[in-house]
């Protein structure tokens, strides 16, 4: 396994790759867990070579958000990737955003709604960094988690809109034994917050067996379910069309429930596809 810290090293490797070898790419912010490793294993199974990037992207964090205290442990991440990845690419912020760089990518519509309204500028940062990495890596396939559903949909949109040749592949959420979605941010929960956070998967289960005829009442019922947990501060509960993320309509084929819930200072998100009854 090679570890590259500079764009020049990566570009040199990419230039020397034999034509016809497929490349799978898994972008991450590090602090790897089984959710990330599932993406890497799938990339391993489907491609000749696997590249994982580790980059905590400053532009997707708001001023009051957790960029500084976002967990980082490169040595542990490299150990986890040993035998799974061919290349780990971990550039610095100065390399990805060199002095004078001024181009941003904005997926209009998707980026300001839902989690974008709670985290202004977040999706512009995500779209910009993902565009930079997809351009640098030139992968055949790139792998993303369904947990970050709005992120996934905005990446699908930008790849289509900008005619990028990389195929986007989405994989289901890997969960802790009690159902909480694995997330690097879970480490920042206190013991009581961690115990309380199980209300999120419970609310998803509750929603999955409820009937969705009136979206407003449905969202209200999910909010009330989450409110049973005193440590849960509900940031948003939304039922949307799974393809467009617009409000559901008679055209909706598949709906998705998107949750964002704070425990102390930690914002956790999760999602579930819903049966349209
Ligand atoms: P992050 O390091 O949080 O930026 O995540 C990198 C990728 O891993 C994104 O595509 C996430 O959606 C995905 N991911 C994060 N957590 C999980 C999980 N629990 N299950 C599946 N994929 C995940």
Image (cartoon, helix red, strand yellow):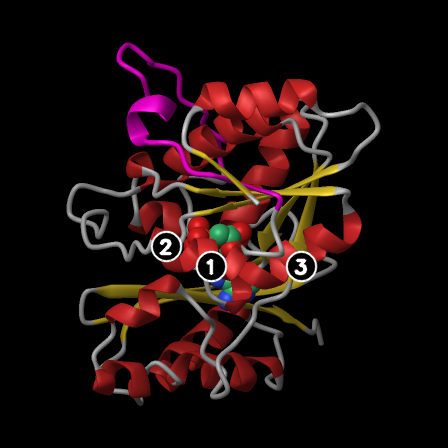
Identify the mark nearer the N-term, 3 or 1: 3
On residue 41, which mark appears?
Answer: 3
Write the residue at 50% across / 87% down: 177
Is residue 106 found inside the magenta-colored segment of the image?
yes
243 or 170: nearer the eye? 170
- Please provide the residue range marked out in magenta: 86-109
Q: Looking at the image, do the residues carrying marks 3 and 1 touch, with CB atoms under 8 Å apart? A: no
On residue 79, which mark appears?
Answer: 1
**Above or below 15: residue 75:** below
**Above or below 25: residue 99:** above
Write the residue at 65% across / 26% down: 138
- Using the rendered view, name the quadrant where residue 136 is placed: top right
Circle 3 crowding by C-alpha within 10 Å: few under 14, some 14–19, many from 20: some
Rendering coords of residue 11 (x, y %): 56, 20
Q: Looking at the image, do the residues carrying marks 2 and 1 touch, with CB atoms under 8 Å apart? A: yes
Q: Label 2 to label 1, Cα distance in Å?
A: 6 Å
């Amino acid at each position: 396994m090679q570890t590259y810290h500079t764009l020049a090293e990566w570009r040199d490797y990419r230039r020397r790759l034999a034509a016809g070898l497929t490349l799978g790419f898994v972008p991450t912010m590090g602090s790897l867990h089984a959710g990330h490793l599932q993406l890497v294993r799938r990339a391993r199974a489907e491609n000749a070579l696997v590249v994982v990037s580790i980059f905590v992207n400053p532009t997707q964090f708001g001023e009051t958000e957790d960029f500084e205290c976002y967990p980082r442990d490169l040595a542990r991440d490299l150990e986890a990737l040993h035998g799974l990845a061919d290349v780990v690419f971990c550039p610095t912020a100065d390399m990805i955003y060199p002095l004078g760089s001024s181009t941003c990518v904005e997926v209009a519509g998707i980026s300001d709604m839902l989690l974008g309204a709670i985290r202004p500028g977040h999706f512009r940062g995500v779209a910009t960094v993902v565009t930079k990495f997809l351009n640098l890596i030139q992968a055949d396939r790139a792998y993303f988690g369904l947990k970050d559903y709005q992120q996934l949909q905005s990446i699908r949109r930008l790849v289509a809109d900008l005619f990028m040749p990389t195929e986007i592949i989405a994989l289901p959420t890997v969960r802790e034994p009690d159902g909480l979605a694995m997330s690097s941010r879970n480490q920042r929960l206190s013991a009581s917050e961690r115990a309380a956070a199980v209300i999120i998967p419970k609310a998803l289960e509750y929603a999955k067996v409820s009937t969705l005829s009136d979206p407003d009442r449905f969202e209200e019922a999910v909010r009330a379910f989450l409110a049973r947990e005193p440590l849960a501060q509900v940031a948003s509960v939304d039922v949307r069309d799974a393809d467009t993320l617009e409000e559901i309509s008679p055209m909706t084929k598949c709906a998705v429930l998107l949750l964002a819930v704070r425990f102390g200072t930690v914002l956790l998100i999760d999602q579930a596809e819903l049966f349209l009854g």
